[in-house]
Amino acid sequence: MFWIILNPQVFTQNGFDITWNYYFASLLFVLASATDFFDGYIARQWNQMTMLGAILDPLADKMLTLAAFLGLMVMGDASPWAIYIIIVRELFITGLRTVAVSENISVKASWAGKVKTVGQMIAIGFLLMHWPFATALLWFAVILTIYSGAEYLWGFKNAITRESK
């Protein structure tokens, strides 16, 4: 998907309209997002959740969304400031969750984190397709990203406080 976003000439030089680039990148993004959802759903249904999965699943989510956001930014379709804020939050919270896991502190994904991920994915879809309101959705995703990051930070602080008592 990242390669497709960065190489639209592959479609246009072969006689296709640029919109085929948008469609194909979007299709790959939706398929990758769907497999990520079903992977987690199946693991929960079959009670096959592992510590490794708890670490790798959020990382896979971030690799997918950040690849899309970075590709869109490089092509001039997404604000560098918005992408910077998202990347900083994602790296910070990933580090925080890694520390929590290493200390046997449970900082589970919150509803705000799940809503943030969905908001980011919707923004990516709109940006990839060059649909109206894509930029507004990107900034709304940034707000969700900041809010969910603060919520994780608060949850981590509360968990450490409980552990120290």
Image (cartoon, rainbow, N blue to C red):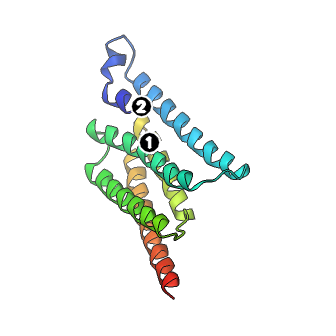
Q: Are marks 1 and 2 in contact (CB under 8 Å)?
A: yes
Q: Nearer the viewer, residue 2 or 123?
A: 2
Q: Nearer the viewer, residue 163 or 133?
A: 163
Judge from the rendering whether residue 131 lies leftward or rightward of residue 162; answer left or right.
left
Residue at x-position 41% and y-position 65%: 96
Q: Secondary structure at mark 2?
A: loop
Residue at x-position 41% and y-position 36%: 128
Find disc 1 in the rendering and name its residue. Answer: 64
Q: Quadrant of residue 85?
A: bottom left
Give the number of the disc on residue 146. Answer: none
Residue closest to the far top: 15
Residue 45 visible in this rendered orientation of the protein: yes
Neighbourhood count class around disc 1 (C-alpha, 10 Å): few under 14, some 14–19, many 20 upward? some
Judge from the rendering whether residue 118 lies leftward or rightward of residue 92; answer left or right.
right
Residue at x-position 31% and y-position 13%: 13
Vertical arrangement, residue 163 with respect to residue 116, above or below: below
Residue 132 visible in this rendered orientation of the protein: no
Q: Amino acid at mark 2?
A: Met
Q: Nearer the viewer, residue 10 or 131?
A: 10
- Horizontal and vertical percent position of residue 8: 33, 24
Q: CA distance from mark 1 to mark 2?
A: 9 Å
Residue closest to the far bottom: 165
Q: Quadrant of residue 129?
A: top left
Quick one: quadrant of the N terminus? top left
Vertical arrangement, residue 41 with respect to residue 95, above or below: above
Find disc 2 in the rendering and name its residue. Answer: 1
Q: Quadrant of residue 143?
A: bottom left
- Horizontal and vertical percent position of residue 74: 26, 38
